[in-house]
Image (spheres, coloured by chain):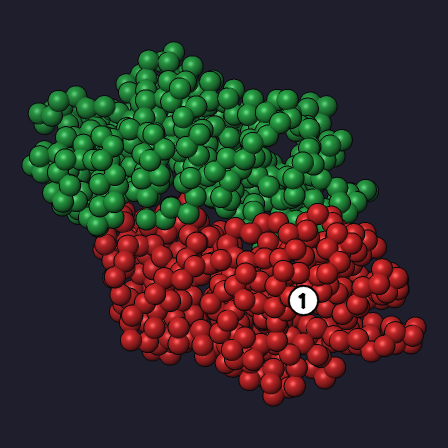
Chain colours: A green, B red
Amino acid sequence: MMEHDAEAGWLRPLIADRLTPFLEIDAARLLNNLQQMQQKADAAGVALRPHIKTHKSVWIARQQRALGARGITVSKPSEGVAFILGGERDLLLAYPIVYADTLTALLQVAAEHQARITCIADSLNGVAAIAAAHQQQPSADLAIAIKVDVGLHRVGVDPHSDAALTLAAAITAAHLPFAGLVSHAGHAYGAGHPAAIGEVALEEIALMRDVQQRLIATGFAPCPVSVGSTPTALAAPVAPGTDEIRPGNYALLDLTAWRLGLCSPDALALSVVTRVVAVNPHYAIIDAGSKMLSSDKGPHGTNASGFGIAVDEHGNQFEVVKLSEEHGFLQFGQQAPSPGTLLRIFPNHSCAVVAQSDHFVLRHADGLAEVLNIEGRGKFI
Amino acid sequence: MMEHDAEAGWLRPLIADRLTPFLEIDAARLLNNLQQMQQKADAAGVALRPHIKTHKSVWIARQQRALGARGITVSKPSEGVAFILGGERDLLLAYPIVYADTLTALLQVAAEHQARITCIADSLNGVAAIAAAHQQQPSADLAIAIKVDVGLHRVGVDPHSDAALTLAAAITAAHLPFAGLVSHAGHAYGAGHPAAIGEVALEEIALMRDVQQRLIATGFAPCPVSVGSTPTALAAPVAPGTDEIRPGNYALLDLTAWRLGLCSPDALALSVVTRVVAVNPHYAIIDAGSKMLSSDKGPHGTNASGFGIAVDEHGNQFEVVKLSEEHGFLQFGQQAPSPGTLLRIFPNHSCAVVAQSDHFVLRHADGLAEVLNIEGRGKFI
């Protein structure tokens, strides 16, 4: 925890205009976060294709588009359906499809709305599954990019192998457009500080350009390079050779971004408003538990010490040290907050918290608020 | 992990009749779990008031009632509304109310449907808030029980203090029925093995009977004693002096219950069906991440090593060692599962997993399945 003189950004008005707990997004902070990233992309001359998995909100995606985002990134086909119905027309599905029927509904909706879908593949199975889905819906505008594993070891071809060459040939043979190379340096979350994150970003682009050059040497036309993670997008300059960046978390940010030195508390746009419901000699208990806050300690094993920092209207801070589903356990020092006290919790991981709720409260600078739907919640397929 | 000869219960048919990932409940295992707990309550002559926060399903609550459950336990007022609308008429709201408006909607629905609500309080604030809510809706059938902290240090009066006497007097002064004493020995999850859990159960009933006796000595009529947690309900005999038990997790069970020695794999009724979407030299990656499995390592800090055990149709086991929102990372030994393979994951904590989804697949013994809603999901207020 920090000195709160230095960290006035913890403090935002706590307005008791609805029952707790609820998810709140600060409109001014959100807009500022969106503008800064767009300016960075514009200045570097690259496309910004934000990952909407962080906010899952059609309204926020629309703000991103209005500021200049060129398309969006989604996690799952059903998330894509929700965003096409919400008005998006250029989607990268950054998830490996290995079973053709998974794509059926998305390609149908895409065809109906003239939306372009770019899928990713890291195996011949994947290319075959995507091609099979396209045969069922040939009027859908569909392309395939190759996912490259730049160090997270989750999805992607080994950049030191010939797998990308094999896949590019298979994509061409399947008569589908080859949309380029895609990576996600999620391991940057584990790098610990901005300088180390910057090195991850440089390694990522070096690996991607190497694969790109080998494709060119084999006879393929130069293909676009798309990279994306919030740590690298915030901590490092956009590297030469990048065509597109795909950060997600930058829209809302969270304690993980703050702990990594990527933002100040002023930039934390998402919080959970909660109320103290019981106090005992050991803990103060609040009405937000794992069902609201998730049990996530941060992306990719960043493993914070607790489950969030709670702040009252005077700036007093309490760490959320334990959770059950409906209760959070706060540690307190000399002075426990009284039952009934409203608190604002800044969570470890915005994406995981937004995934719990069906709607959020958008709080404007004048204190007025509106309730907006989280259209992408609960989309598993 | 265990020898699978000894643990044939891991194996259940994996039927590829829908897109992954999805939540599956085995109807036969569920019914068996419900029957065994009801028989235990009946044999001891106590009421069983199951906590529905585990399954959040109106259909499952109806099965519990048909077998003999006397009322249900809910976590939050909005969960109570969903279950009254689903047909329940006797609800214990096992959550401290400290803000009157939180109860408004529940008391209105309860009054319309002649449902009885028992609230809990552990402070004078709480009694006052509940009484104020009742004044807005005096036709609602409302009672207050006193919550006693028997060791979890979450909610409840100190059983060694006079707080229960003060609260019982306040409840009587507010002209509301005093419904007795309620406890939850959630710390039993940390006891490690059945014998130690049995000791927690004995301490719990001793504390509860002591408070009850002091109330009687002060002039109150003998009041009912309600205790409830799945570990104590499964590991210990129902203690003399108990009037009601309120376990929840027993309906579905999970790896935490299995690790505590409370059940065999045959009893695990809940699983997540998932598919391998990528394989690299480090991990096999599946299409269920924290959004589906939650990041919960077990109730009350039981802290398992991973996020679930995945089993294929041949009984091969893989631990889920890491999660991102949409991806699970499986550790494998000599042989990685191939992309496309279906797996069944038994999670650490059923309650947290059910809280992620809007519906579940109920799989019957003949392999046929139906999709049922999870009416209680997303009820935060």
The 10 Å Cα crowd at callout 1, few under 14, some 14 to 19, many 20 or more, is many
Could you tell me which residue is drawn at 46 percent across and 52 percent down?
Answer: B356
Residue A164 in sight in this render? no
Task: State the count of labels.
Answer: 1
Residue in the image at 65% along x and 86% along y: B45
In the rendered image, the residue lying farthest to the bottom is B43
Where B239 sits versus B86, above or below? below
Instruction: Name the image quarter holding the N terminus of chain A.
Output: top right
Q: A87 left or right of A363?
A: left
Left/right of residue A304 with respect to residue B111 in the rendered view: left
Residue, disc 1: B116
Q: Viewer-proximal residue, B37 or B307?
A: B37
**Image: A373 above or below A201:** below
Q: Does the image show residue A30?
A: yes
- Coordinates of residue B248 in the picture (x, y in percent): 56, 68
Question: Residue A221 appears at what percent x and percent y?
Answer: 13, 22
> Residue B87 is drawn in which quadrant?
bottom right
Residue A378 image offset from top left, x and y in percent = 42, 47
User: In the rendered structure, the residue with mark 1 lies on which chain?
Assistant: B
Badge 1 marks a residue whose secondary structure is: strand
- Residue depicted at 33% across the width and 13% down the height: A45
- Does A18 appear above or below A365? below
**Given the image, on which type of amino acid does mark 1 rest?**
Arg
Name the residue: 64% across, 22% down.
A366
Residue in the foreground of this view, choosing between A33 and A125: A33
User: Considering depth in this image, is A42 or B336 the residue closer to the camera?
Assistant: A42
> Is residue B362 rendered to the left or right of residue A354?
left
Q: Nearer the viewer, residue B248 or A223?
A: B248
- Return the residue found at the far top: A43
Residue A200 percent across, percent down from the top left? 39, 29
